[in-house]
């Protein structure tokens, strides 16, 4: 049976004017068309001011030529173990053929990652996709789908050994005419004790209805048997106990699951129907359903229901977490939908709607809705928390470009793909967002496209209020950012100058966060690609031609929203592995600038100590270094530059207690 889910068909441009995007979103942009006919699937195709433990540099742990880790929500793909080791999985693929696709895997043994990061090897012996992981003690459990008739369940009795055994798990037989499918797709896993909780969809091809529901979302509860390393599965239940009269269809990856103690929480947040929470307090035996958002077109079917008023709806990417008291915390991205032609088997969404809603069980549901119930301004006015694009250069808001810049689509909005941790009375949110300009990819200015970055924030009062600071988690410390590039004030700055730095930052998407917080550390992985967007979804002709990387980072969880404050990056305070420096060195000035022979550098210092002056180019390469004696108070240095090639450089004065950096132009 052929299994290819048709991809997003094209990139569409913003009709751009400068517009501030603090909460407000752009509603006059062109929409992105999504084909919804299912013909199979390629899965939508000395003393330091800041301690080194505050933020580890991001580390390259894996490779894939399949640059799409989910159709919507990120299931659990990384586990932090109590002994400080880490297990991580992702969908991998070699450069030549999709037949090599499967679950990539790496293991951190407390000192290093055991597998070569350049490897595209999979753990399965057969083609699979969409791997997700959980653990029972030191036993690793991975579920993926084979795309034809079953899930592939892998069990490794001792983490890190890669001693995997695999079995298949077929779903209920679903008939369509004379054809029958036992397919289970797009799994998500969670565990508590010896209980495994799993979600998966039935056959997605049109006409395969399970109890009258297309692509039906099922919940499986399993018991892990340590005596023989097997799982005993109970009969499946339809998530939410919904009927075909309530829900016409579910959507792959538009759901999330979490388990803690005896509490199990399942969130369903599709574009086409209600957002609801299905929660159990007895380890999955009984569930209670809460509708969080009532869809204005409940039961919407893409090809048969005419929708012309572009209502605000969930974007199909969501996350759920359980706090220490058993309370559920959820988030989902927001988009708008349009189906003005019921003959073309497609609908449209607005990828430039940049808003993500946070909700917990202390908040009122959003019911009796109309087309504007999820309008971000309305949500904020009603007291809900809405995450929007991040002001990364401290100029008062995130801006749209003054020219046509496309938004590569993943089928989600511009702020989306959330991950949540709720622990110790605090809530930690990690998500992706379209970056503040000038973070565009371009071959030339007319072909620019927005990059996405990974960001984080925290609430210290269990989600009631949130920090004003945002951490830019995917920030590449090798890069230097110059705020005036796009004003074209400096004619010596070329496209190549800009490109070399922008490419290093690249597209950072699909964050996965371990729910286990060990020794106060948050463990995060994500996918990096130098091109924005997904080749798999947007350009199937060049599928598997470009390598994407899986990155890993560990941070102190309570520094989320405190370190790497995005505006500090532009001030030159976050450019090395020490994180944000204090301002023990201040008032740094350079003149003349531009310079050709030498440049005078003046600055003030709080302490007398030894220091260093360094000069790097825009690629982060060191071109000059020298020791300096820094005195308390005013300091003056003359730096010769005639030996340097013409171009842009960053000059840094660093001591044990302070750091300051300025841009220098050599002509």
Image (cartoon, rainbow, N blue to C red):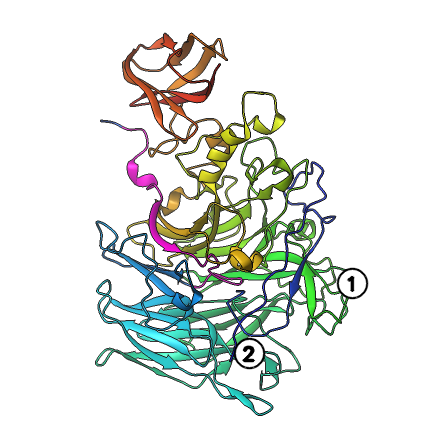
Instruction: Indicate the position of residue 39 as horizontal and vertical percent values.
Output: 59, 74
Secondary element type, mark 1? loop
Q: Quadrant of residue 220?
A: bottom left
Q: Quadrant of residue 634?
A: top left
> Is 412 contained in the magenta span?
no
Residue 622 visible somewhere in the drawing: yes
Q: Residue 144 placed where, x, y %? A: 40, 71
Which residue is tagged 1?
308
Report the side of 198 relative to 226 (left or right): right
Horizontally, residue 261 falls left or right of residue 449, namely left
Q: Is residue 446 above or below residue 271?
A: above
Question: Which residue does the image show at 67% across and 55% down from the upper left?
Answer: 350
Q: Is residue 70 magenta?
A: yes
Bounds of the magenta span?
48-75
**Prevailing secondary structure class for the magenta stretch in the rendered image:** loop
In front of the other: 496 or 421: 496
| Residue that badge 2 annotates | 216
Residue 424: x percent and y percent? 38, 54
């Amino acid at each position: 049976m052929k299994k290819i889910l048709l991809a997003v068909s094209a990139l569409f441009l913003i009709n751009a004017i400068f517009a501030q995007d603090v909460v407000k979103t752009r509603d006059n942009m062109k929409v992105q068309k999504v084909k919804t006919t299912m013909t199979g699937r390629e899965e939508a195709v000395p003393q330091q001011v800041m301690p080194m433990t505050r933020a580890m540099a991001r580390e390259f742990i894996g490779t894939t030529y399949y640059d799409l880790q989910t159709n919507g929500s990120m299931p659990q793909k990384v586990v932090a173990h109590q002994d400080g080791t880490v297990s991580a999985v992702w969908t991998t693929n070699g450069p030549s053929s999709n037949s090599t696709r499967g679950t990539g895997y790496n293991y951190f043994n407390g000192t290093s990652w055991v597998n070569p990061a350049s490897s595209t090897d999979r753990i399965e012996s057969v083609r699979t996709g969409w791997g997700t992981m959980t653990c029972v003690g030191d036993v690793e459990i991975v579920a993926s789908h084979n795309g034809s008739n079953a899930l592939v369940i892998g069990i490794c009795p001792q983490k890190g050994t890669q001693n995997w055994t695999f079995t298949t798990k077929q779903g209920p037989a679903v008939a369509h005419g004379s054809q029958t499918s036992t397919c289970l797709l797009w799994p998500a896993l969670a565990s508590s004790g010896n209980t495994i909780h799993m979600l998966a969809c039935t056959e997605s091809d049109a006409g395969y209805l399970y109890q009258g529901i297309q692509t039906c979302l099922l919940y499986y509860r399993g018991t892990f048997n340590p005596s023989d390393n097997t799982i005993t599965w109970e009969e499946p239940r339809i998530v939410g106990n919904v009927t075909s009269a309530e829900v016409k269809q579910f959507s792959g990856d538009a759901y999330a699951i979490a388990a803690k103690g005896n509490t199990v929480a399942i969130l369903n947040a599709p574009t086409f129907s209600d957002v609801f929470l299905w929660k159990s307090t007895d380890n999955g035996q009984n569930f209670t359903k809460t509708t969080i958002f009532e869809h204005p077109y409940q039961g919407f079917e893409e090809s048969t229901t005419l929708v012309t008023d572009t209502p605000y709806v969930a974007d199909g990417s969501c996350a759920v977490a359980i706090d220490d008291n058993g309370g559920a915390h959820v988030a989902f991205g927001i988009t708008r939908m349009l189906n003005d032609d019921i003959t073309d088997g497609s609908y449209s969404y607005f990828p430039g709607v940049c808003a993500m809603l946070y909700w917990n069980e202390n908040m009122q549901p959003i019911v009796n809705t109309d087309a504007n119930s999820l309008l971000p301004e309305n949500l904020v006015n009603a007291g809900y928390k809405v995450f929007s694009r991040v002001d990364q250069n401290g100029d008062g808001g995130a801006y749209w470009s003054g020219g046509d810049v496309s938004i590569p689509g993943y089928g989600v909005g511009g702020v989306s793909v959330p991950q949540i941790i709720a622990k110790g009375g605090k809530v930690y949110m990690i998500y992706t967002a379209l970056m503040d300009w000038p973070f565009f990819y371009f071959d030339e200015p007319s072909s620019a496209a927005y990059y996405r970055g990974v960001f984080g924030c925290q609430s210290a009062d269990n989600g009631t209020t949130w920090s004003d600071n945002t951490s830019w988690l995917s920030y590449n410390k090798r890069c230097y950012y110059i705020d005036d590039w796009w004003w074209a004030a400096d004619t010596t700055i070329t496209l190549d100058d800009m490109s070399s730095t922008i490419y290093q930052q690249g597209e950072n998407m699909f964050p996965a966060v371990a729910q286990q917080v060990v020794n106060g550390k948050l463990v995060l992985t994500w996918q990096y690609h130098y091109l924005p967007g997904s080749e798999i979804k947007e350009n199937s002709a060049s599928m598997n031609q470009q390598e994407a990387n899986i990155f890993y980072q560990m941070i102190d969880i309570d520094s989320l929203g405190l370190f790497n404050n995005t505006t500090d990056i532009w001030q030159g305070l976050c450019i090395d592995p020490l994180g944000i420096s204090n301002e023990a060195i201040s008032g740094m000035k350079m003149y003349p600038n531009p310079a050709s022979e030498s440049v005078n550098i003046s600055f003030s210092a709080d302490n007398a100590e030894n220091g260093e002056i360094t000069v790097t180019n825009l690629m982060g390469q060191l071109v000059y270094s020298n020791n300096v004696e820094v005195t308390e108070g005013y300091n003056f240095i003359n730096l010769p530059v005639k030996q340097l090639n013409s171009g842009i450089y960053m000059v840094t004065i660093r001591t044990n207690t302070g750091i300051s950096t300025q841009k220098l132009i050599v002509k």
